[in-house]
Image (cartoon, rainbow, N blue to C red):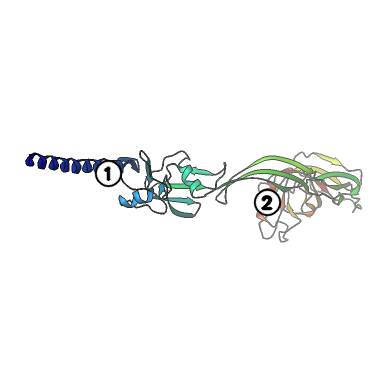
Amino acid sequence: MHTILKNKKWLLAMGTVFAIALFSFVLHNNSFAEVKLTVDNETKTIKTASDTVEEFIDENDIYIGDSDYINLNKDEKLEKGMEVIIKRSTPVTIKIGNQSITRKTYKNTVKDILNTLDIEYDVNDRVEPGLSTTYEKNMVINLTRVEKKEVVEEDKIQYNTMYKDNKSLDLGKTRVAQEGSEGVKEITKSQVFENGKLVKEEVVSEKVVKEPVNKIVEKGKKPITVASRGKKTTPKTTRPKATTSRSSTKGSKTITMTATAYNLQGNTASGVPSGPGKIAVDPSVIPLGTRLYIESLDGWGDYGYAVAADTGSAIRGNKVDLFYTSENTCLRFGRRKVKVHILD
C-alpha cells in the first residue's frame, strides 16, 4: 500500500514537469515570428523573436549604409509574415558636359537615378542611355544640355551704281545725280547649343526692312569742241575699214574699237616713256601723237584723255591697248568695246 502511494506521487510529479516543459515549449515557439528578408532580390525566411525592425537587423548582423534602401522604419514593430526589403546602393557616374560626378544610389532606371539625385533636365536635353534603361554596374550616364534659340540679326544690302548719259555735260566729265544708301534686311535664325556650344544654325526667314537706294552717276556726252589746226598732209596708206561717226563739232571723229590693257614699263614706239594716258594704236588707223578721249561702253568707267604713243604686234586695225599701272586691273579689264574720240 505504501509502495503504491509512493508511485502515484512520482507519477504526479513527472506529469507536472512534463506539463510545464510542454507549456514552455509551446510558449517559446509562439514567441518566434517568421519574417521574409529580401536583400538585392534574394529572399529567405527567418524565425525571429525580435520586437522591432531595428532589433531584427541587429540580430541578423545586417549592415545598412546611408544610401541603402529599406522599406520599413527601424522603430516599426515586427509582426509575423512581415517582409523586410533592403536594396544596396552602388556608385553611378553622371557626365554633364565637361563635368563628371559620382554618387551612390539604389535606383534601377536612369530616370529614377537622375530624379533621386535631384539632377534636373528638360525635354530638349539628351540623356544617354535612355531614361527607361535599367542601370548596370559601371554604366556612365551622359546628360547633354540642349538649348534652342531663335535670334534676329540685321545685315546690310549694298546699293548699285547706275550710269546715265547726260548730253548737256561735257564728254569725259561725270556728276553724281543721286547718292546711294545701303538697305537693311532682318535675318531670323534658329540656333541649337549643346553644353553651351553652337552646333547648328539655319536661316528661318529673311525680311527687307529698308530698301537700298542706288547711286546714279551721269556721264557727259556733250561733244568737245576742238579748234582746227589747219590742213594736214597725211601719207596715203591703206587703212582697215573703221566704224566711224562724225561729230557735229568740227575737228572730232569717233571710232568704235576693241580695247585691251597692258602695264609693261619702258619707252614707247614714239620715244616717250610708257605710263597712264599712253596707249598703243595701229598707226595706219590712228597716227602716233594723236590726242584722244577713250569712252567706256559697258559701265567700266571712261579711260579718259590719252595720246597715241605706242604700237604693238597684236594691235592691228580697230584695236587699242590701254596702259594701266596695275596688272590686276589689266586682267580684270580683259577685252572690251570702247569709243575712241579723235581730238586732233
Please tell me the numbered disc located at residue 28.
1
Residue 244 x %, y %: 82, 40
Seen from the viewer's position, the closer of residues 6 and 124 is: 6
- Could you tell me which residue is drawn at 55 percent across and 46 percent down? 121
Residue 157 percent location from the top left of the image = 75, 46
Judging depth in this view, the residue of 107 and 163 nearest the camera is 107
Query: Relative to residue 245, is residue 193 drawn left or right?
Result: left
- What whole-number distance in Å separates the C-alpha atoms at marks 2 and 1? 117 Å
The mark tally for this picture is 2
For marks 2 and 1 on the same chain, the one whose residue lies earlier in the sequence: 1
Three-letter residue code for mark 1: His
Mark 2, residue position: 330
Q: Position of residue 75 (x, y in %)?
A: 42, 50
Q: Is label 1 in a helix, a strand or a loop?
A: helix
Q: Which amino acid does the dot numbered 2 rest on? A: Cys
Q: Residue 325: which quarter of the image?
A: bottom right
